[in-house]
Image (tube, grey):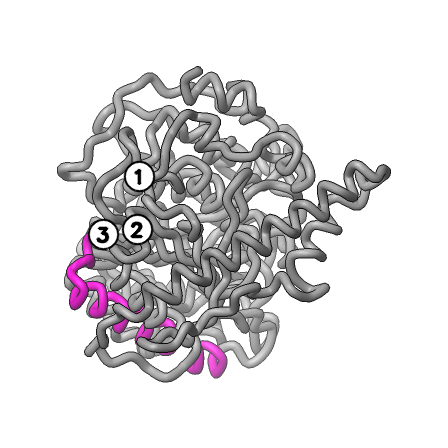
Amino acid sequence: MNRRNFIKQAGCAAMGSTTLLSTLTQLTSLNGALGKQPGGAGYPTDYKALVCILLSGGVDSYNMLIPMGVSASGDNGFNEYKAIRTALSVLNPIALSNPQCVGFRDFTCNYGAFGVHPQMSGVRDLFNSGKLSFISNVGTLVEPLLNKTQFNSGLKKVPVGLYSHSDQMMQWQTSVPQSRNALGFGGRVADLLNAANSNTKVSMNISLAGKNTFQRGQDISEYAISNNVQPGSVGFEALPSWWSNTGYMTDLRNSTMDSLVSQTYASLLQESYSSGTKTATAAFEVFKAALTKVSPITTAFPADKLATDLLAIAKIISVRSQLGAKRQIFFVNYGGWDMHDDLLTGLDSKLPVVSQALKAFYDATVELGVADKVTTFTISDFARTITSNGNGSDHGWGGNQIVMGGGVNGGKIMGAYPKMDANNPLNISLRGNFIPAVSTDEFYAELALWYGISPSDLCYVLPNIGNFYSYSPGRYPIGFMNFNGTAISTENYPQNCLTY
């Protein structure tokens, strides 16, 4: 049985509604069922890592990336920006050098000159050196929406729970916005590639933020750690959040309560908990041995939690050989972005933390010799309203995200930065909420292809991708990753993953 037929029969089309209990009863090992052995033939032999930073709460990303001045094309983006943002305007953004603003699909690039928040000089420097790009007006979509008329018609599917923190945060982690019970993007990637690592006692999904949806797959879930990573010290919790009623058991209980009607299911729950405990303990021992090989990283990191989390990731990457890792996915959460009040002060405090941590982490990957093998990206619940509520902004939709690394096609604003105008066809409210021009599916598909996912497996990783993108050799979803020298399968890609 080949991979495509297996995934089809295992229920690829049902990934958006599969419960955690069904994963326990349907599969014992996806990679095992595919006939793949850990570290065996057919898997990538180089090293690559994805680092996902969740900016939870909904970051006001239109004060992070700002149109500026009068560009060569004649636009006056900064005046338009100030006119609609009024008291929320950042008055002294720092300019990006020669940013290339690239339009996307049916959308044009509205501005030619851009700057970033004045507290983001590290991001500015990475952008100008070609190591960082912005993905503009990206967000959760079930299918393309071109304007307010299509949105209001009721004929197009839209994400459930728009403007809801819990829904939109989950949907950014799953890229299945029509469901509240889907597997995570990172988890589904790990289902397919975890066996690329020769030592599968440690999940390729490592979390600095406890249990999360992003890294939960059909067969693979996260291994949660603390950020206290140093030679001679384990710095990990053997049973991270599982040994309490707020972690693993609660996650299982909530996912299985409706089906927990017999002793058979109760036994499965007990067996799964026991298996999880054994798995975590085995991973703990592997990490304990590997950390004795950690070499000091000379790059200076700030002392805040985000930077400390990223430093811990850099240290783990430094012992990738000892861990037998060819592929790793890391997850970090940096919250506090729900700024309905005192927005300008709040961003002045939090944006420099992000900027400095990103710059330090990129420099550390250069020091480790893996800068082109590690791609870091931000996600967030949603953007904020363009207009002010008096002293802050409220829940929006499409926004701007960062992608950073030596493999990034840097110095660009990809997507379609929206026209700062209430009459913009993408604006669906009086407050200025923009329909995303770029879907999370397209955003993640680009990362997945760079990471080593075959185009023929994209429908498992992203069940809605067929609504937005069909692979052909040399044609990539957005263009923010550099695929030079990267072999991509030419197997025909299905047009409609949901019926695949």
Left or right: 22 with respect to 317?
Answer: right
Q: Is residue 354 magenta?
A: yes
Asked if the residue at tag 1 contacts the one at tag 3, i.e. Cβ–Cβ closer than 8 Å, the answer is no
**Distance between the alpha carbons at the discs numbered 1 and 2:** 9 Å
User: Quick check: 72 above or below 103?
Assistant: below
Report x, y in % for residue 269: 72, 46
Identified at 56% across, 34% down, the residue is: 28
Q: What is the span of residues highlighted in magenta in the rendered image?
A: 344-373
Left or right relative to 22: residue 59:
left
**Tag 1 near tag 2, CB within 8 Å:** yes
Q: Mark 1 points at which residue?
A: 39
- Amino acid beneath label 3: Lys
Label 3 or label 1, whichever lies nearer to me, is: 1
Task: Evaluate whether residue 100 shows in this view.
Answer: no
Of mark 3 and mark 2, the one earlier in the sequence is: 2
- Residue occupied by mark 3: 373
Inter-mark Cα distance, 3 to 2: 16 Å
In the rendered view, tell whether residue 202 sits above or below residue 387. above
The first of marks 3 and 1 along the sequence is: 1
Q: Which amino acid does the dot numbered 2 rest on?
A: Gly
Say which residue label 2 marks: 324
Q: How much space separates mark 3 and mark 1, taking CA atoms?
A: 18 Å
The residue sitting at 64% across, 39% down in the picture is: 179
